[in-house]
Amino acid sequence: MDSAAVIEVSDLRHSYSSVEALRGVSFSVPKGSFFALLGPNGAGKTTLVHALCTLLRPSGGNVSVAGLDVRRAPRAVRRSLGLVFQEASLDDRLTVFENLIFHARIYQVPRQERRRRAWKVLALVELEQWANAPVSDLSRGMKRRLEIGRAMLHEPTLVVLDEPTTGLDVQSRRRIWEYLERLQKDHGVTLLLTTHQISEAEGADWVAIIDQGRLQALDHPARLRQGIGGKLINLQIGDDAFRQALSDRFPGKCKQRDSVIQIEAEDPDSLLRELVADEHQWRMVDGLEVVDPSLEDVFINLTGRELRDRTANLSR
Ligand SMILES: Nc1ncnc2c1ncn2[C@@H]1O[C@H](COP(=O)(O)OP(=O)(O)OP(=O)(O)O)[C@@H](O)[C@H]1O
C-alpha cells in the first residue's frame, strides 16, 4: 500500500442480484486531501461508500482504510472513520449535547474525555448555544452541522460524507463548506465526499468521476478541465444546415443540443473573428458565449451525457 494513502480501493466490484453497481473500481486517496467522488444518481457512489464503511460486503476486490482491510478488521476501520450520510441519523428526542455524548459512548471515547470533546465539536460547528436544545428544535442545516461535528468526536483520520448538502438551502450549504474546509486545513482530516453537484467537486484536491459503476477519470479538477483544451464556444444557431456545416468543419470538437452547438476551440479568437467577418454567417448566429470548460463539460466529454439538466441561456 502507498503509505501516504488513507484509502486504497482495488478492482472493487459489487452486484445487487442482476444490477452491477461497481464494475472494477480502483483508486487511492492521499492523506490529508479533499477527495470528491462525482457522478450522477445511480453511478455507484453510495455502494462504494458503504463498502468503505463496512456497511456492505463487496462482491469482489479489496478496500483498505488507514492500512486496515475492511473485511478483516471492520471494527477498527469503523473507528478510524467519521460518517455523515444523506439521511438524518440524530435522535430527535435527545438534546444536542446528549446526542454527542451517546455517540462518544458508542465509539468508546474514554468517559473523562466525552464532555470536553463534545464542547470542542460544538465550538467547531458553532452550535454551543444549542447544547441543551432538543434536536427537534434545530433547522435542517443545523442538524447537518451537528452530524459533521459528531463525526469528528472520536477524532477520526478520515471523514466520509455521502451527498452531505442534499436538501439544504444555499446559505446552509455554504456554512457546511466552511466547516469542511476547516476540518481539512486546520485539523488535517482527510475528506471523502460523494456528490452529483459540480460546484462541490470543483473545490476538491482530487476528483474521481464515476459513471455506471466505472471510474471514468481521476485527477485534479484543473487538470481534468485542461484535458478538454482551450475554451468552449456556445453558438445558438437556428439554421440546421449552418450548424451541420460547423460540425463537419470541426470533427470530434462539436456537440449539439437543440439549437446550440458547442465547439472546443484552442484559439477561440480566430474562430470568432472569422465568424464576425462573414456577414451572412454572423447574421445566423442568434446567441454566443465563450466559457472555460467546467467539470460538467469533462463529464459530457467522457460519457456523452449530462450530469444534470442545463438550459442554454445565451445572449449575443
Ligand atoms: N439495495 C439495492 N438493491 C438493488 N439495486 C441497488 C441497491 N442499491 C443500489 N442499487 C442499484 O445500484 C446502482 C448504484 O446505486 P448507488 O446507490 O450506489 O448509486 P449512487 O451513485 O449513490 O446514486 P444516488 O446518488 O442516487 O444514491 C443503481 O443502479 C441502483 O439502482
Image: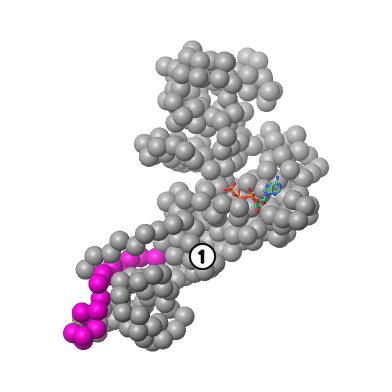
Name which quarter of the figure residue 250 lies in. Answer: bottom left
Name which quarter of the figure residue 309 lies in. Answer: bottom left
The percent coordinates of residue 109 (x first, y second) are 66, 22
Name which quarter of the figure residue 57 lies in. Answer: top right
Pick the residue in front: 177 or 302.
302
| Quadrant into which the C terminus falls | bottom left
Left or right relative to 9: residue 89: left
Left or right relative to 4: residue 169: left
Magenta includes 44? Answer: no
The percent coordinates of residue 98 (x first, y second) are 57, 15
Write the start and end of the magenta stretch as one range. 278-293
Q: Which residue is identified by label 1?
A: 305
Mark 1: which amino acid? Answer: Arg
Pick the residue in front: 273 or 2.
273
The percent coordinates of residue 288 (x first, y second) are 27, 70
Q: Which residue lies furthest to the right in this view?
A: 72
Magenta includes 279? Answer: yes
Q: Residue at x 72, y 57 (%)?
A: 20
Q: Residue at x 40, y 58 (%)?
A: 310
Q: Which residue is drawn at 63% across and 52% down?
A: 44
Above or below for 58 versus 157: below
State the scheme by which the image is colored.
one colour
Above or below for 110 versus 212: above
Q: Residue furthest top?
A: 132
Tell me, yes or no, if residue 207 can be seen here: yes
The percent coordinates of residue 172 (x first, y second) are 40, 35
Q: Residue at x 55, y 47 (%)?
A: 194
| Quadrant into which the N terminus falls | bottom right
Left or right relative to 38: residue 177: left
